[in-house]
Amino acid sequence: MLSFLLRKILYSILVLVGVVIVTFFIRPPGDPARVILGQRADEQSLVALRKKMGLDQPIPIQIAYYFGGLVTGDLGKSTATERDVVETIAERFPATALLASTAMIMATILGILIGLIASSRPNTWLDSAVMSISLTGISLPAFVVGLLLVLFFGVALNWFPNSGYVDRGAAHLFLPMLTLAIRPLSIIARVTRASMLDVLGSDFVRTARAKGLTETSVFVRHALRNALNPVVTTISAWFAGLLAGTFFVEYIFNWPGIGLLAFNAIEKLDFPMIQGTVLFTSVIFVLVNIIADLLYAVVDPKVRLQ
Amino acid sequence: MKHDRGMSLWVVAWKRLNKNTGAVIGLAVLVILVLMALAAPWITAFDPTAQIVEYGVKPAGFKGPVILMKNAAEPDRPKMRAVQSYRTVRDSVFYVDPAGVEYRVHASSLVGTGPEDWYREPTFILGTDKLGRDLFARLVYGARVSLTVGLISESIALAIGILLGALAGYFRGWVDDVVMWSANVMWSFPSILLVLAFSIIVGQGFWQTFVAIGISSWVEIARIVRGQFFGIREQEYVTATQAFGFGTLRVMFRHMLPNAAGPIIVLSTAGFATAIIAEASLSFIGLGVQPPTPSWGHMIHDSIGYVTIGTNWGMLLWPCFFMAAAVLSVNVFGDGLRDAFDPRTSQR
């Protein structure tokens, strides 16, 4: 187990190095100094800025500097607001974490529930309705879903506020949370349904029924417990993705998290901030996936041997 | 060797696909969208980029009278002026704009010779966007961008993915390690952020968008091809081709690749849908295809401020509907393909 752990962690570090290198190249095409100062900048200030940004060094040295800054927790300063990138990200993270975790809880509970309902009435109109709606949920990007929800719940019905953060009332959480939850919800529902149908067809379920157990007992105590394994995998795989999914959702609902920060940075061509947010999200993504992998190895000994 | 009896994989797959109602509907919708994209100039008489700012954000079915003025720079695209009414006095034309101000122009600066040439009362069947461009025309022309992105980006992804996957699966060892390392690096970025990063690196525009999406979508394909090649390389016919002295490339791409075709085709339909979404997402952010080229993602972004006011809702709903239709039909068709190629699915 220990050697598995060690190998896994070493490899992840190697992958993270690659992630940092890709992130390093998120910069304006051509000469970054000219992009920042504009076409009419004079040669002197261009040279000065290039020196300040380390652009006069060869690329590998620049990458090394970038790593150096990273290790000491320095991702530079925003070119738009002059604020420290790491500090700003730390400030914005709670909002994103709140949105992602509530959306995940909602997706898990509703997804399993809907999947169960569909699998209890396979091949009926209810089942096909649930499956078609979930296929639509999987197919549509978050910004489309979000705007349609705003149009329906916010504008037409006027039940929930269209945008803003929870500091103006908890109701502000609902629409962004639902928008973010729809995709994982649809996938969890489909996986639960498929897995349940699989298990319900197996011999031990037939035995349970033959013993005369009630349908509810067969369903919940016997089938569901065995069907949950792939569902748990899906959930852990999606949690990491959700953090990135907040990108559009935060923009549409004006939710002050990492996603909105990145969006605004792109609009202002604020490259240190773009790099910072991309790097931060990717590192979280990798970390969550490693934790999921490790948990999986603890649960399932077969994984360790691979 | 020829098949003496029975049917090839392709014929079987096609027959199975034909029995799958969902897949056939998906394919039909897709064909309609492709035809719409190809025949765009015949479907709508409007220029998707022509603006009549006075007629911005009008509801469906809006009739907007215009006069056409000569455009020295582009003779084929006359300038359109919104008018309430007009009167001609000898060789001058007086027209009243929607704000009620009267202007005078010389008849020679108008298109053609008489009102029958330069006066029009076009109907905007789905209304207009914020710059007074015809919504329907932009939707129809927008299909071109979306479908081209799907096609070209997916081709780029396929080329990279097949090449790297084949190399990794055939040579294994350090080649495999390097390919899988890069795949895992790409995998570590949430997909939209990866596309975004590449789009910033390669720059914005029509072709850049294709490249950015293409180089960020090869990972899945490479993994599948690699896995397939792992298995196929152990088969006897591959040893036979090597014994014949065929070159490595010939063995890989002429003999091994066709046997991995099923999963690749299935994956590329899924990739097609993902590419359409990626382009719309990029354009939504403003990094994708640049205006005034019509793109569904851009149209959706443009509608944001107006949706909450409750003016022309079609500005949001129509591009969403078209995009959903495109993505859903590709996905449903792809699901059908997967079932058709999967030998485990029973024939019904």
Image (cartoon, coloured by chain):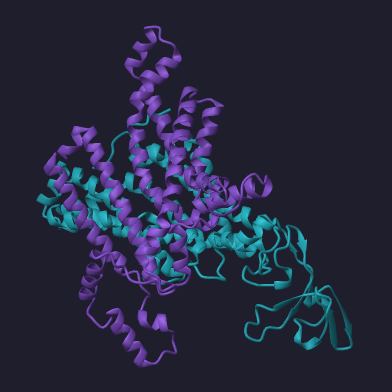
Chain colours: A purple, B cyan
Position above or below: A113 against A47? above
Position above or below: B140 against A1? below
Which quadrant of the figure contains the C terminus of chain B? Answer: top left
Residue drawn at x 14%, y 55% is B246
Q: How many marks?
A: 0
Asked whether residue A284 appears in the rendered view, the answer is yes
Residue closer to the observer: A195 or A148: A148
Residue drawn at x 40%, y 51% is A243
Give residue A297's quadrant in the image. Answer: top left
Taking B292 as reference, is B240 left or right?
left
Which quadrant of the figure contains the N terminus of chain B? Answer: top left
Q: Position of residue A120 (x, y in %)?
A: 47, 22
Position above or below: A273 against B72? above
Q: Position of residue B224 (x, y in %)?
A: 28, 47
Give residue A232's quadrant in the image. Answer: top left
Q: Position of residue A292 (x, y in %)?
A: 28, 42
Position above or below: B85 against B146? below
Q: Position of residue B97 (x, y in %)?
A: 80, 76
Asked whether residue B217 appears in the rendered view, the answer is no
Residue drawn at x 53%, y 60% is B297
